[in-house]
Amino acid sequence: MKKKMRAHAIIRGRVQGVFFRVETKRAADRCRVKGWVRNLVDGTVEAVFEGDKDRVEKTLAWCGQGPPHSTVEDVKVRWQDYTGEFRDFRILY
């Protein structure tokens, strides 16, 4: 059985106004990861990813690159216990 994990990420750089949230949702959906993503008032993007650890890591690796017009400077990740609370991946506003 694969290990399930939860990752809480803060992505810093040029990550707002460049379709980062939409593309993060696409990446999470491709990897079959659940959770959410949202913009924060300080210009960063916050996300929570849950699923198989290897799939969460793949989604986080994508976040380190981001979509074409973004410039990711840093991704801070805090690993947490899996909760299973999410049914899908959503963009929060």
Image (cartoon, rainbow, N blue to C red):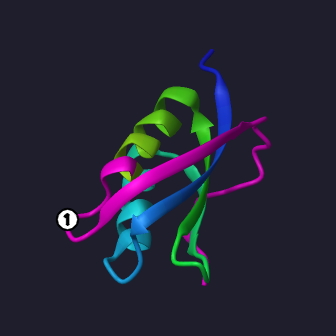
Q: Quadrant of residue 77?
A: top right
- Tell me the SS state at disc 1: loop
Amino acid under disc 1: Pro
State the residue lying farthest toward the top.
1
Relative to residue 68, is residue 50 drawn left or right?
right
- Which span of residues is magenta-colored? 64-93
Say whether residue 87 is magenta: yes
Q: Quadrant of residue 46?
A: bottom right
From what the image shows, is residue 10 above or below residue 80?
below
The residue lying toward the viewer, choosing from 72 and 81, is 72
Say whether residue 22 is magenta: no
Relative to residue 42, is residue 32 drawn left or right?
left
Q: Position of residue 58 (x, y in %)?
A: 41, 37
Please name the residue shown 49% across and 50% down the image.
Answer: 75
Figure quadrant of the N terminus: top right
Please name the residue shown 31% across and 77% down the image.
Answer: 18
From what the image shows, is residue 79 above or below residue 20?
above
Please name the residue shown 39% across and 41% down the image.
Answer: 61
Q: Position of residue 63 (x, y in %)?
A: 40, 52
From what the image shows, is residue 25 above or below residue 60?
below
The residue lying toward the viewer, choosing from 92 and 31, is 92
The residue lying toward the viewer, choosing from 35 and 32, is 35
Figure quadrant of the C terminus: bottom right
Q: How many marks?
A: 1
State the residue lying farthest toward the left.
68
Q: Position of residue 84 (x, y in %)?
A: 75, 44
Q: Which residue is mark 1?
A: 68
Relative to residue 37, is residue 25 drawn left or right?
left
Please name the residue shown 56% across and 29% down the image.
Answer: 53
Q: Residues within 10 Å of mark 1 (few under 14, many from 20)?
A: few
